[in-house]
Structure formats: structure tokens, C-alpha cells
Amino acid sequence: MKNKFGFILVKPQLGENIGACARSIKNFGFNKLNIVSPKFSFPNHKAKTTSVGAYNIIDKAKIFHNTSDALDEFDIVISLSARRRDINKRHISIKDFLNILKRKNNTKFGLMFGPEASGLSNKDLSLSNFILTIPTSQKFKSINLSHSVTIICYEIFKALNPIKFSKKGRSLKISSKSKQSLFVKYLISLLEQKDFFLPEEKKQSMILSINNLVYRFEPNDKELRILASIVSSLSKN
């Protein structure tokens, strides 16, 4: 996907929230931040300090006096709302949103977030193409502004970078069968010295259980050496 993304904060009330939003925007590889009528002189000290390593996002943020102007550069605008609004606008899920991203290649998307206390007004919502609600507990639906931005950034990042989410952790080479067998034989010999296999008629079934345990474990060479050292140390007592 070659889509471009921007984040629009409408009338944000707290500088620290803008700073935290900037961090999330940068964390996931985005850089465009539009701010509509912030409730304080921007950028203030709290916005700067909270942004930490993302001050460049704050520094390049564009300030607008009305929402319409802040949305002009985008092809499709998605509004975020904590509750379903009774307006003639399509409400979509995160899954729907990601499907739209896939279908609408080379599209500029704007993600619009409302004030912390009240959310977007119906007038602001009317300027968007879709309304997206992040699913939450029915008992407490309100999400902090910066948290909402983080969730959306993460979902877009995941859609754009599927390989990063399919990589398996680096696997260590499993110790050879011969080395594992030597360890099992060593363990069994020590257990025999301690008269562990009693009664005698259960010895074979107990050895089978030991085999199953060790071979299912699939130890690497380092783990096998540690196990052998532990067993050796215990046998000396």
C-alpha cells in the first residue's frame, strides 16, 4: 500500500496529550500532524516535554482555525468517536477500516480525533467519510486521546508491515540426537546407582517417561550442558 496518513486533533485541551500523540505518530513511522484550535498557546512546554524524541512532529505540526481547512489535503477522512452517533454516516469497525486501506491504494487518509472532554461535534463528524469506534468495555468506553491515536497508528502500521508480525523468533539449534542420548544414558546410570527404578517391573515404563521428557524438551547444547551439570551435582550428595 502506498497510502499516506495524517492525524488531525480537533481542539485538544492538554499539551501533554499532544506530546504523547506525537510520540505514537513517530513510533509507527508517520509524521503528519494537523491541530485545530488548540485550547492553549501551541506548542507549550508540556507538549514539548511529553513528545520526548518526537519533537520534530510537534515542530512541523500545522495549526488551523477551523476543521474544514485541516482536512482539505486528504482524500478520505475517518473520524474517531467513542460512541455511535445518530447521524447519516457509515459507522465502521477497525476491520472495515483496514479493508478500506487495502482497496484504496494511493489515497491520502486523515484520521480525526476530537477534544478530550467531549469528542468530535456533529458538525466535525459531518465532514468525514466514515466514523470509526474502537471497541472497548461497555462499562467504560472513553479512551484517552493519545491512547486512541496509538491504537490507530498500531493498526495501520501492522497492515503496512505484515512481515514484521510474521517473523518468528531466532531459534537456537537443537542439540544432536546423539548428545541427547548420551545425556539420557548418563541420567539413567546415575538413577540406577541411587536405586531409583523401584519396583523393578516399572523400570522400563519409567525410562520411557524420561525419554519422552528429554526428547520433547528439544534442548540446545548449552541447555543440555546445564542439565548434565545439575544432575552431576545432585548425584554427589
Image (cartoon, rainbow, N blue to C red):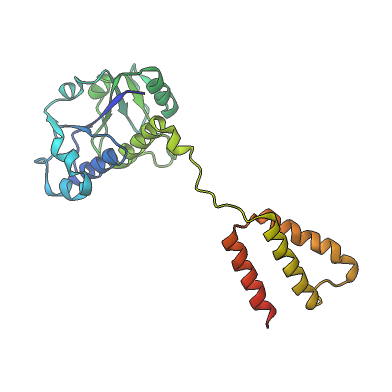
**In front of the other: 49 or 160:** 160
Determine the image quadrant of residue 117. Answer: top left
Q: Quadrant of residue 184?
A: bottom right
Q: Is residue 171 above or below residue 67?
A: below
**Image point (70%, 65%), residue name:** 183
Q: Position of residue 159 (x, y in %)?
A: 41, 30
Quadrant holding the N terminus: top left
**Percent position of residue 35, x then y:** 17, 33
Which residue: 85% across, 72% down? 198
Q: Nearer the viewer, residue 44 or 105?
A: 105
Q: Is residue 198 left or right of residue 229?
A: right
Q: Is residue 100 left or right of residue 194?
A: left
Which residue is found at the position 14% from the left and 35% from the top?
Answer: 60
Q: Residue at x 39, y 25 (%)?
A: 97
Residue furthest out toward the right: 201
Q: Is residue 85 visible?
A: no
Report the side of 26 relative to 60 (left or right). Answer: right
Asked if residue 201 can be seen in this view, the reply is yes
Q: Quadrant of the C terminus?
A: bottom right
- In this view, 34 is above or below 182: above
